[in-house]
Amino acid sequence: MENLPLLGGVEAGGTKFVCAIAREPDQPLVEERFPTTNPDETLARMVGFFRENGPVSAIGIGTFGPAELNPDSPEFGRILTTPKAGWAGADLVGALRAEFGDDSPISFETDVNAAAVGEAKFGAGQGKANVCYVTVGTGIGGGFLHERKPIHGRMHPEIGHTVVPDFNAEFEVPNPGSACPFHENCFEGRASGTAMARLWDQPATELPADHPAWKLEAKYLAHGAMNLTAAWSPDVIILGGGVLQQESLIESVRTEFAAIAGDYWDNLPPMTEYLVTPGLGQQAGIVGALCLASGRA
């Protein structure tokens, strides 16, 4: 393994960046985590990490978005319109190529597509051709592998902004409404960690397991999973992110999904195999970024 080239990986999140080097994607040798502040400071730390720990043969980036993934676009490698203040137009690929050269091999993907790749190679999606990975944290994002390849489109899927019903009134939440500045009834605005904190006046991490917030959250996540099932027909849906650290939540989502889906999808696997949590835990994103660098996506 010592003869294998060094790979570089970046998990560019709205809250933190994770940078790593490895010879095998699932075995990072050096890893550094730092807060996502302003673009100049954050991207300088990213570049500095690879300057100090390289040279690397290739770099894979999984980023928050929206982002321009089309390598033929003049905006390739940039963050597009985003609610993350100051980050619209930030050029992640450009920052690395300015340091290491215009020919530097850099793969650029969404953070959730990168996590889907990592889980398909080394985690809960192994052996599956059509893998959906959903992260439920500050926002909600989803990545999808079709026949083991990340799906794109005109841009890339934004499942956090699919529409879900409003169940807040059923639970008498203190602050009903959406946490999304763009949409009133989107998945992210109703079920993200940011939405939970707004609805209940406290972060999800501080809500006890028997709080009604978790029943409401399970209902929203089950409806989101049903939308994904109907639209993409995946082999497995992997639910990750900080909100899924509540261990009882995944079973509640399975129960709610079975109730609302009825018998329409009678060929689905058992819920314990269809709706799952990440096999790689919080490492899915960085392992996936390293897979992108290796060319194994």
Image: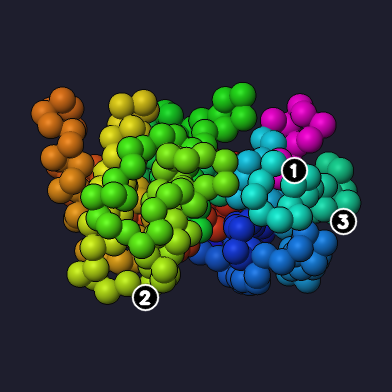
Front-most of residues 35 and 144: 35
**Residue at image mark 3:** 99
> Which residue corresponds to the image point at 41% horizontal and 34% vertical from the top-left?
163
Q: Earlier in the sequence, mark 3 or mark 1?
A: 1
Residue 118: % across, % down: 47, 50
- Circle 2: element type: helix
115 left or right of 85 in image: left
The residue depicted at 73 percent of the width and 31 percent of the height is 71
The answer for how far apart the CA atoms under marks 1 and 2 are is 35 Å
Per the model, the C-alpha gap separating discs 2 and 3 is: 42 Å
Q: Could you classify mark 2 by the number of other residues whose Cα lies within 10 Å: few (under 14), some (14-19), or many (20 or more)? A: few
Report which quarter residue 108 is drawn in: top right
Q: Please say whether residue 16 is visible from this viewpoint.
A: yes
Residue type for callout 3 = Glu
Q: Which residues are magenta?
A: 70-80
- Which label sits in the foreground, 3 or 1? 1
Report, in whole angstroms, how far the alpha carbon at label 3 lies from the one at label 1.
Answer: 16 Å
Tell me the element at label 3.
Answer: helix
The residue to which callout 1 is attached is 78
The 10 Å Cα crowd at callout 1, few under 14, some 14 to 19, many 20 or more, is many
Mark 2: amino acid: Glu
Q: Which residue is mark 2?
A: 206
